[in-house]
Image: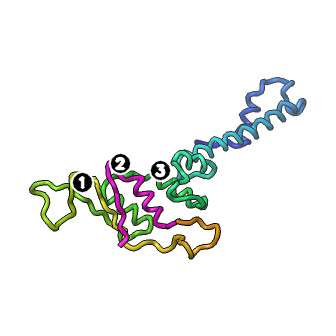
Amino acid sequence: MAVRSEADYRAQLRQLLPPGPAWDPDVYPVPAMVADAAAAELARVDARAEALLSEMFPGAVRELLADWERVMGLPDACLGQGASPAERLTEIVRRFSEVGRQDARYFEDLAHRLGYPDAWVEMWRAPRFGRMRFGRARFGGWASQFVWVMHMGTRLPGGVRFGLTRFGARFGANPNDIVECVIRRYAPAHTVVFFDYS
């Protein structure tokens, strides 16, 4: 969209004035002054409309950050508060462009992005004739087909524990809570996920 300048609107408004000596700016300058004032406002509104069009996609957001956060379900209860505007914009762009899946690789990538480079998924299977061998995989009853284990590797350092914190710190806060919260949110609804930090 081409933004018209104040000079463009001024020329357009002056051309719209009717002909005759009553509208001559040298004789009676008030209509030309009104046209000049209106041209400034029209140019300002035109520039604001152009700025609003650039806010349609999250990569160019400058003014509607809070509205985009509301649409994308942010701030995230799992990630908590306190992100900088740049981090908030990065999270909006990630959520806008992300295509979720429900396979093991998606959850491994999610854990890798949240700071667990060694994470991998183990799927449990229900016993089926001809498909299960003793000692090859975990299996149990028929409900086992809905269980999977997220092997995270080592825990992230940090967290608040009794005797190692100051007054006012949130007791029980753990950096591992973030990845567990996010994975449980996106896990298929009919499954149960366990986390292993060994």
- Inter-mark Cα distance, 2 to 3: 22 Å
The picture places residue 165, in percent across and down from the top left corner, at 59, 73
> How far apart are labels 3 and 1 at the CA level?
32 Å
Q: Which residue is mark 1?
A: 145
Q: Looking at the picture, how far across and down is residue 48, in whole percent?
A: 66, 43
113 displayed left or right of 166: left
Instruction: Work out whether 30 lies above or below 192.
Output: above
Q: Dot 1, how many residues are within 10 Å of its Cα: few (below 14), some (14-19), or many (20+)?
A: some
Which residue is identified by label 2? 189
Q: What amino acid is at disc 1?
A: Gln
Identity, as a three-letter code, of the amino acid under mark 2: Ala
Q: Amino acid at mark 3?
A: Phe
* Label 1: element kind: helix
Residue name at image x 51 percent, y 73 percent: 158
In percent of the image, x 50 and y 67: which residue is there?
174
Query: As rendered, which of 92 and 173 lies closer to the eye?
Result: 173
Q: CA distance from mark 1 to mark 2?
A: 13 Å
- The residue tagged 3 is 96
Q: Which residues are magenta?
A: 173-198
- Secondary structure of the residue carrying tag 3 is helix
